[in-house]
Amino acid sequence: MSKILVTGGTGYIGSHTVVELYKAGYTPVIIDNLSNSSSKILAQIEKIIGVKPEFHQFDLCDTEQTTAFINNNPDISGIIHFAASKAVGESVQKPLKYYHNNFFSLINLLEAYQEKKINFVFSSSCTVYGEPDALPVTESAPVKRASSPYGNTKQIAEEILAESAAAYDNYNIIALRYFNPVGAHESALIGELPLGVPQNLLPFITQTAIGKREKLTVFGNDFDTPDGYCIRDFIHVVDLAKAHVAAIQLLEKGNPNGKYDVFNVGTGKGYSVLEAIKAFEKVSGKTLNYEVGPRREGDIVKVYGDVTKSSSELGWKAQLGIEEMMSSAWKWENYLKENPIE
Ligand code: UD1
């Protein structure tokens, strides 16, 4: 079966995608520099699928190593490119790190394939929409000025990919714009492993509930929304992983929309931060210690995706709901308590 290169394959979304690729009959091959993940995830993946995926540890910013790897692996037919720096706050402090890592790795990969055909799936984000003018936001909504260097890397990467697909015959590309990935594999053997203090909502909720953090601070409840809390389109990471398999399959069949395409990957339904907390409390049976604090600078008030195009043209639709997202995240946090992964 076809070999698919998964860059960043030991990371949160990458590891779940490796599992789903394997289940769909592909042979995933991982490249990761382990800058924000653990090699122990390979053994966890093996516990789920029964085989240890092929793994190569190096930095895709290294042009020579990347080119040599691609030349030595001519049987790779597709790439799912997750490997990137992704902390919004850090990107404001260290913009050059973000531009360096996120662009050199992307360009090295594309250049290594200049003479060869490749199907390429890129990890993009709903952050490209900024605060949308209309909801649910469709793929044709305007891309708004990025509010962080991280967001800017996603926008510019999409432009690099669109221009490359237009200019060269050999690339067939899909960018997936993720909404808010949460949850973990049902086995609780893989999940999100935040380094240090989590910046995102869900790991902060589960770490608070398990006692690793004293309390969650909710960043504002006076927004122009029905309950005053921000609204997000939370998407189960396993559903998100499956969207990547669907994207590879569409590229293999030939995408009638052309050589570059974008899809929203969300559920299409928005939940407020308060509703997310309540859903967590319901499935965990825990009362969450939280307080409302000031707004976080740069936060989007409400965003959820129109998933009509993903459903009709990508042939993918989210199956799992908010309670499955919360219960799997909670099960994973409990697993980590007993089986810490450093
Ligand atoms: C954030 C990034 C976004 C990125 C995404 C990646 C910002 C401004 N945006 O999105 O660019 O693509 O992560 O996963 O950082 N919240 C709290 N308390 C917390 C943490 C979060 O109240 O401790 C709230 C936030 O204010 C927000 C919601 O929970 O309303 C979701 O936050 P988060 O998980 O950080 O995701 P985004 O802000 O959507």
Image (cartoon, rainbow, N blue to C red):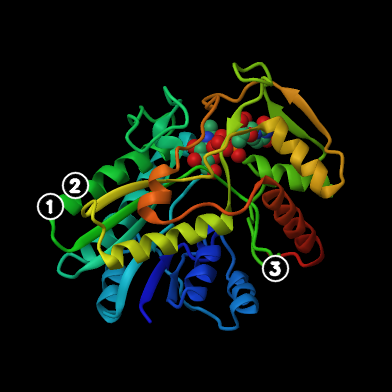
Residue at mark 1 to residue at mark 2: CA–CA distance:
6 Å
User: Who's the residue at 31% across and 68% down the image?
Assistant: 66
Q: Is residue 32 above or below residue 100?
A: below
Residue at mark 3 to residue at mark 1: CA–CA distance:
44 Å
Res 167 label: 1
Q: Position of residue 63 (x, y in %)?
A: 28, 64
In the rendered view, does 259 fall on the left or right side of 219? left
Res 187 label: 3
Q: Amino acid at mark 2?
A: Glu
Disc 2, SS: helix
In the rendered view, does 339 fall on the left or right side of 102? right
Q: Position of residue 60 (x, y in %)?
A: 36, 63
Q: Amino acid at mark 3?
A: Ser
> CB under 8 Å between callouts 3 and 2?
no
Which quarter shows the C terminus?
bottom right
Image quarter where ligand 1 lies = top right
Nearer the observer, disc 3 or disc 1? 3
User: Who's the residue at 63% across and 75% down the image?
Assistant: 48
In the rendered view, does 175 fall on the left or right side of 298? left
User: Who's the residue at 67% across and 50% down the image?
Assistant: 325
> CB under 8 Å between callouts 1 and 2?
yes
The answer to whether any part of residue 6 appears in the image is yes
Which one is in front, 93 or 214?
Answer: 214
Q: Which residue is mark 2?
A: 163
Residue pushed farthest front? 312
Kindly indicate the quadrant of the structure image that contains residue 253. Answer: bottom left
Q: Is residue 333 above or below residue 152?
A: below
